[in-house]
Amino acid sequence: MTMGTDSRMQPLRHGDRGPAVADVHAALRSLGLLLATAPDGEAPALESAEYDEATELAVRHFQQVRGLSVDGRVGEETYRALSEARWSLGDRLLRYDPERPMRGDDVTNLQERLLELGYDAGRADGMLGAETEAGLRAFQRDYGLTSDGTCGPATLRALRQLGRKVTGGRPQLLRQSASFVESGPHLIGRRIVVDAGHGGADTGFAAGETTEADLVFDLASRVEGRLAAAGATVYLTRGRSQGPELAQRTAFANDARADLFISLHMDAHSSEHARGVASYYYGTGSGASSTVGEQFANLVRREVVARTGLLDLGSHPKTWDLLRMTRMPSVRLDSGYLSHPVDRLLLLDARVRSAIAHGVLAAVQRLYLPAEADPATGTFVLPDKR
Ligand SMILES: [Zn+2]
C-alpha cells in the first residue's frame, strides 16, 4: 500500500482505476473478502485495476464488520482500517514508539489478551500507547519474562498459553465504570469538552441562510451554559466562526484531560422522510466498546427524545476517529434531520434547542448518579445554583 494516510485523499470509488485500486484489491484479498485471482486466472496490470462492483461489495462488507460508515468507498478512515487489518499477532515485533505509535489488529489482539488476563492495557483501540506498554511490562514481570515492553516470540508464547484460561469479565471496562461511580453525583470539578460539529468553510447541511454549523454552535453554547451553571468546567472545541480539523478537536479534548466528550451534529439526508435523533459511541459492535460511552450515548438520546418528541433512532457503536482518538468516553449526538420539514422547524426554534441542551445536562448528571438514585427519563431537573 503506497498512499499516505496523513495527506487528505479523494475517496476511491466505483469506476476508479489505477495502482491505488490495486492496493485496495490486495488488502481485500489478504482479508479473504475478494477472490485470490481474477476469474480468468491472470492478475491485471496495476494501471488497469478497476474498482468494480465486486470491489464495492467487498468494501461495504469490510466497513460493516468494522463499524465504519458503510458507503462502499475507500476514504481515509477505511483506508487506514484496511491497512491495520492486515496485521495479525506474531507478524511483527510490537513495541511502544511515542513518535509513531504502532497501529493494527495485532495491537488490538495484544490489548484484548492483556485485558482478559486482568492487566490494565488501556482501551483495546489498536494503538500501542504508554498504557499498553505498561500493561505489557507488568505481564512480563509477573510471568518471569524480560520486562522490556516488547512483544516478541517468548511473550507471545506466554500469552497464548494463558490467554484462554480467563473467560468472562472485561476488567478494563469494569474499572472504567467503577471510577465513574466513585466520583459522585456532583459536576463540580468535571471537565467536559463540547464539540460543535463543522464550522468555518465547512457549513455542514445548509438550507438557505441556516447552516448546521451555526445551529450546533448555538446548541453547544446552550449546553456549555447549563453545564457550567451546574459546576462543570466546560471547553468548546471551536469559536463561532472557526472550523478546526478533526485531529485538532480530539487533541484538544485529550490535552484538556476531559472526563467526557460530546460532539453535536444535526443530520441531513437526500430522502426527506429521514428524521429523528441518533447517538454514537466508540465500539466495534463485537466486544471492545466503552461502557461509559455507551451508557452516556443512551442517556443523552433518551433525554433529548423525551424533551423534544423527535423520533428515537437508537444508539450505535462506531469506530469513527472522533470517538476513537479521544481518550475519554466520547459520544456524538445527531439531534434531528435538517432535511426533514418537521425536524427542521423544531430545530430552528430556540426553545427546542434549549430543551435539547437541558436533555444533555440531565444525561451528564445521570451519568454521575449512582443507579439507585437515577430518576426517570425526562424528569430530572437540577436545583438552580443561583
Ligand atoms: Zn454534521
Image: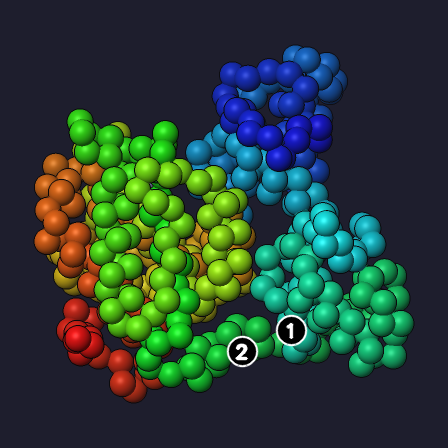
Indicate whether 70 appears above or below 121.
above
Q: Residue at x 68, y 49 (%)?
A: 104
Is 341 displayed left or right of 42 in the figure?
A: left
Please say whether residue 274 is visible from this viewpoint.
no
Cα distance between the residues tagged 2 and 1: 9 Å
Question: 258 above or below 194?
Answer: below
10 Å crowding of disc 1: few (<14), some (14-19), many (20+): many
**Dot 2, how many residues are within 10 Å of its Cα: few (below 14), some (14-19), or many (20+)?**
few
Percent x, y for residue 144? Answer: 87, 79
Residue 139 appears in the figure? yes
Query: What residue is shown at x 10% (from left), y 46% (from top)?
Result: 349
- Depth check: 106 or 257 in front? 257
Please say if 176 is above or below 242: below
* Quadrant that contains the C terminus: bottom left
Q: Quadrant of the N terminus?
A: top right
Q: Give me the residue at 60% from left, 42% from top.
A: 81
Left or right? Give the position of 210 relative to 239. Answer: left
Q: Is residue 112 above or below residue 311?
A: below
Pick the residue in front: 40 or 302: 302
Q: Which mark is residue 318?
A: none
Q: Do the residues under discs 2 and 1 have CB atoms within 8 angstroms? A: yes
Residue at x 46% of width, y 64% of height = 258
Q: Percent position (x, y) of residue 300?
A: 28, 62
Kindly identify which residue carries mark 2.
Answer: 175
**Element marked by disc 2:** helix
Q: Which residue is mark 1?
A: 120
**Which sits earlier in the primary sequence, circle 2 or circle 1?**
1
Residue type of the residue flagged with mark 1? Asp
